[in-house]
Image (spheres, rainbow, N blue to C red):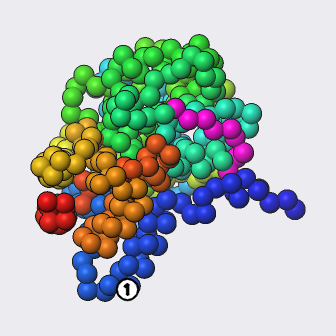
């Protein structure tokens, strides 16, 4: 047998696993110090009541002969696809049910979708970037090129007609920087993709954090996007499903074979999201569900405000936090990202994510998440004030 040697081209461990290992070591050596985790974007508020109510009901159904369900449709039950369809319709985006695929989250689908593309494709990713886009392509041996995101372009790189790419990753609101493309900017990417016969893989996992109605939450709000874009979304950050696992991927029929092949791929390699979870997902899209998740998002946004106000007061340059749960800051005193990570852990027991973990342009930056509890966020910022006054 021959092993897939592309794996040897990856960083030794996944960014968030490296961080978890470092934090575990610190905690074992300092058992009495309270660590505040604002690193990985994991939610802390529990699932909404209407979601758990729906799941309880589904559990009961599973225990009764008449309502028990075994294998479901691999692409998801229609009751969830219909809920997603209505959710998009409210924003003026019309989707057919067979363009909507229910999944166990955006991370897996963003990796799995690559099954549909030839290894010869050149992949364009912004830098800094969510490491999954890069790592999954390295695993497949694809050529990855980067679009520089930096202070000069406000972390929103634009297409360069001299660069030829076949697959383009866009995440807006962006992980890690929190930057959001407006419609005019996204239109330029759509036009670039159309003229290069490229496909945009649009990660909309943070769309529900957008508070400005004029900003696009879906790439399909842009004319022409259905002819060149696949959209990935997740209930992880929107509705606290990080541990529950449910998301959806839109593969427009206009993409022809890609829609058919994705169904073929999913029916072969995936057995669908559990019925109980899909009932919980359905509840997210009800009127009550939307009301309850918005309260949670408002809570996280309040945390982002606390972080942002503290950093402003301390004169620490930062962006994000407004339409996103992430705050992207410049490491004080020109520290490198990992030095700052160690310094903060050692001196304030606050965990963040080193910007360098997201790419070379992330060096010298650091990401904090607003997904902590209010009390911990306030305490973390009090520790910042002591450290950087
Ligand atoms: C992050 O912290 O970047 C995210 O939580 C990672 C993810 O969604 O997989």
Horizontal and vertical percent position of residue 84:
38, 36
Q: Nearer the viewer, residue 380 or 44?
A: 380
Whether residue 359 is visible to the viewer of this picture, yes or no, is: yes
Q: In which quarter of the image is residue 123?
A: top right
Q: Is residue 43 left or right of residue 12?
A: left
Q: Nearer the viewer, residue 340 or 233?
A: 340
- Give the mark count: 1
Q: In which quadrant is the C terminus drawn?
A: bottom left
Residue ID at (15%, 52%): 314
Q: In which quadrant is the N terminus drawn?
A: bottom right
Residue farthest toward the front in the current orientation of the protein = 333
Horizontal and vertical percent position of residue 39:
35, 60
Tell whether position 308 is magenta: no
**Magenta-colored span:** 139-147
Residue ID at (36%, 56%): 335
Q: In this view, does 349 lie to the left or right of 109?
A: left
Horizontal and vertical percent position of residue 13:
57, 63
- Asked if 348 appears above or below 311 in the picture, the reply is below
Whether residue 169 is visible to the viewer of this picture, yes or no, is: no
For label 1, the crowd category at 10 Å Cα-Cα, with few meaning under 14, some 14 to 19 and many 20 or more, is few
Q: Is residue 367 left or right of residue 211?
A: right
Q: Which of 158 and 264 is in front in this view?
A: 158
Horizontal and vertical percent position of residue 234:
40, 45
User: What SS does tag 1 mark?
Assistant: helix
Residue ID at (74%, 33%): 120
Q: Name the residue under label 1.
A: 29
Residue ID at (73%, 38%): 119
Some atom of ligand 1 lies within 8 Å of the CB belonging to the residue at label 1? no
């Amino acid at each position: 047998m021959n092993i897939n040697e592309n794996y040897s081209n990856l960083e030794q461990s996944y960014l968030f696993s490296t961080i978890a290992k470092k934090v575990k070591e610190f905690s074992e050596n300092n058992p009495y110090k309270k660590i505040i985790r604002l690193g990985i974007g994991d939610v802390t508020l529990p699932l909404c009541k209407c979601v758990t109510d729906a799941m309880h009901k589904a559990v009961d159904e599973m225990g009764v002969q008449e309502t028990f369900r075994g294998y479901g449709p691999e692409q998801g039950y229609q009751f969830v696809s219909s809920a997603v369809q209505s959710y998009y319709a409210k924003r003026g985006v019309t989707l057919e049910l067979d363009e909507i695929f229910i999944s166990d989250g955006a991370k897996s689908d963003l990796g799995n979708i690559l099954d549909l593309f030839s290894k010869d494709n050149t992949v364009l990713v912004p830098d800094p970037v969510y490491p999954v886009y890069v790592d999954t392509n390295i695993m497949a041996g694809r050529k990855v090129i980067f679009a520089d995101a930096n202070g000069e372009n406000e972390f929103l790189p634009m297409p360069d007609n001299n660069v030829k790419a076949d697959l383009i990753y866009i995440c807006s609101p962006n992980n890690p920087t929190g930057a959001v493309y407006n419609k005019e900017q996204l239109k330029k990417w759509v036009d670039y993709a159309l003229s290069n016969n490229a496909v945009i893989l649009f990660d909309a996992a943070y769309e529900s954090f957008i508070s400005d109605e004029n900003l696009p939450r879906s790439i399909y709000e842009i004319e022409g996007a259905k002819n060149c874009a696949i959209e990935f979304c997740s209930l992880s950050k929107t509705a606290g499903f990080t541990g529950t696992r449910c998301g959806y991927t839109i593969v427009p029929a206009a993409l022809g074979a890609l829609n058919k092949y994705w169904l073929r791929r999913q029916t072969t390699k995936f057995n669908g999201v559990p019925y109980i979870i899909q009932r919980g997902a359905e509840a997210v899209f009800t009127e009550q569900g939307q009301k309850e998740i918005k309260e949670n998002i408002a809570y996280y946004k309040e945390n982002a405000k606390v972080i942002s106000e503290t950093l402003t007061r301390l004169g620490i340059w930062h962006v994000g936090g407004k339409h996103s749960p992430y705050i992207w800051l410049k490491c004080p005193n020109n520290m490198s990202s990992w030095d700052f990570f160690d310094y903060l852990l050692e001196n304030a027991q606050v965990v963040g994510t080193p910007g360098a973990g997201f790419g070379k342009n992330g060096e010298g930056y650091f990401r904090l998440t607003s997904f902590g509890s209010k009390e911990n966020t306030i305490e973390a910022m009090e520790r910042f004030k002591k450290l950087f006054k």
